[in-house]
Image (cartoon, helix red, strand yellow):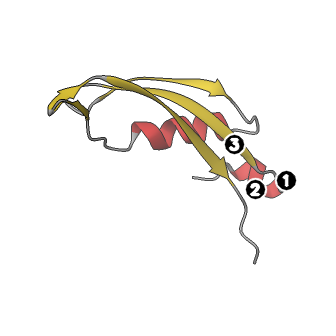
Amino acid sequence: KYPELARRKGREGQVVLRLTIGAGGELKDVSVVDGGGHGFEDAALAAVKASSYAPAKRDGQCVECSALLPIRFALKDG
């Protein structure tokens, strides 16, 4: 959800998160690598925690992995 204060001020931004996904597809850890201010970090963290994931596979076996996830917040015209 777009942060209301950022929307009112016409702010856009990007947050980069580091996710650790377990071998069962569960979100084990998430941290902010690069924040965008204006409430974007909290909105990005809430969205990631509410999402579901598929585990990474190596040689056909599910494995834990880490990944960087950029989330862009952009206002639409109109």
Q: Residue at x 48, y 44 (%)?
A: 47
- Residue 18 drawn at (x, y percent): 51, 26
Q: Is residue 16 above or below residue 2?
A: above
Label 1 sits on a secondary structure element that is helix
Q: Residue at x 59, y 25 (%)?
A: 32
Which mark, by number, is residue 9? 1
* First along the sequence among labels 3 and 2: 2
Q: CA distance from mark 3 to mark 1?
A: 16 Å
Instruction: Judge from the rendering whether residue 74 lies leftward or rightward of residue 54; answer left or right.
Output: right
Look at the numbered discs 3 and 1 and tell me whether their residues touch, using CB distance below 8 Å: no
- Residue 2 drawn at (x, y percent): 63, 53
Q: CA distance from mark 2 to mark 1?
A: 5 Å
Residue extending furthest toward the front: 59
Instruction: Judge from the rendering whether residue 56 lies leftward or rightward of residue 48; answer left or right.
Output: left
Dot 2, how many residues are within 10 Å of its Cα: few (below 14), some (14-19), or many (20+)?
Answer: some
Q: Nearer the viewer, residue 30 or 23?
A: 23
The residue beneath circle 3 is: 14
Look at the numbered discs 2 and 1 and tell me whether their residues touch, using CB distance below 8 Å: yes
The residue beneath circle 2 is: 7
Dot 1, how many residues are within 10 Å of its Cα: few (below 14), some (14-19), or many (20+)?
Answer: few
